[in-house]
Image (spheres, rainbow, N blue to C red):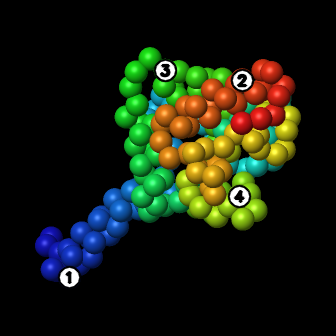
Amino acid sequence: MRLPAAALGLCLLAAALQRADGAFGSTPVTEHFDEEFSSFFLKSTKKSYALRKSNKEQKPLMVIMTRAGCGACQNLKQSVKLAKGETTIKTIASEFLIVHAEGTKADEWQQPYQGYAPQVLFYAPGETQPLPIHGTAEAQPHYFHDHDTMLWGMQKTLEVVESGERYN
């Protein structure tokens, strides 16, 4: 049975929109980051759940907040995906619990007056406020723009948690 041209056009449009949603909509974490790194991500983005789990497992928590269609967010994700070398985020990710909150799921993590994306927050086990681990932009303290700055933040978090000091 042949489809009329209009029906065929609608089918093609629907297929294209499904692929576009994969690029900019709600997709599994493995579509944003590679499978190895994604294996350390929590299934839930709920703040109360993540903070409880961090405390229970005595692991620091890293929260990556992004927005669909955000170029800087895509750049961050790609730099993590493509990172190669001795020390990568993937080599120390097992020491963290990680949340990827995109779009409205990031709202409960959002710090006051910090509406930009991407943002990365670091929490010590048992603490409800993020550590003062800041990226490279003074006006946007939680802006971590690539693999290297995020790796630095993770290493700094491990140092801060181990020492008990709360500094950047």
Mark 3 nearby-residue class (10 Å; few <14, some 14–19, many ≥20): few
The tag earlier along the polypeptide, 1 or 3, is 1
- Distance in Å between CA atoms under marks 1 and 2: 61 Å
Q: Residue at x 72, y 54 (%)?
A: 109
**Residue 68, x across and y down, in percent:** 49, 61
- What label does residue 87 carry, if any? 3
- Distance in Å between CA atoms under marks 1 and 3: 53 Å
Instruction: Give the label, 4 or 3, closer to the camera.
Output: 3
- What label does residue 110 carry, if any? 4
Mark 4 nearby-residue class (10 Å; few <14, some 14–19, many ≥20): some
Give the secondary structure at mark 4: loop
- What label does residue 67 carry, if any? none
Disc 3 marks which amino acid?
Thr
Q: Is residue 142 left or right of residue 144?
A: right
Disc 4 marks which amino acid?
Gln
Quarter of the N terminus within the rendering? bottom left
Mark 1 nearby-residue class (10 Å; few <14, some 14–19, many ≥20): few
The tag earlier along the polypeptide, 4 or 2, is 4
The tag earlier along the polypeptide, 2 or 3, is 3
1 and 3 marks in contact (CB < 8 Å): no
Residue designated by label 1: 6
Disc 1 marks which amino acid?
Ala
Instruction: Give the label, 1 or 4, closer to the camera.
Output: 4
The tag earlier along the polypeptide, 1 or 2, is 1
Mark 2 nearby-residue class (10 Å; few <14, some 14–19, many ≥20): some
Whether residue 39 can be seen here = no
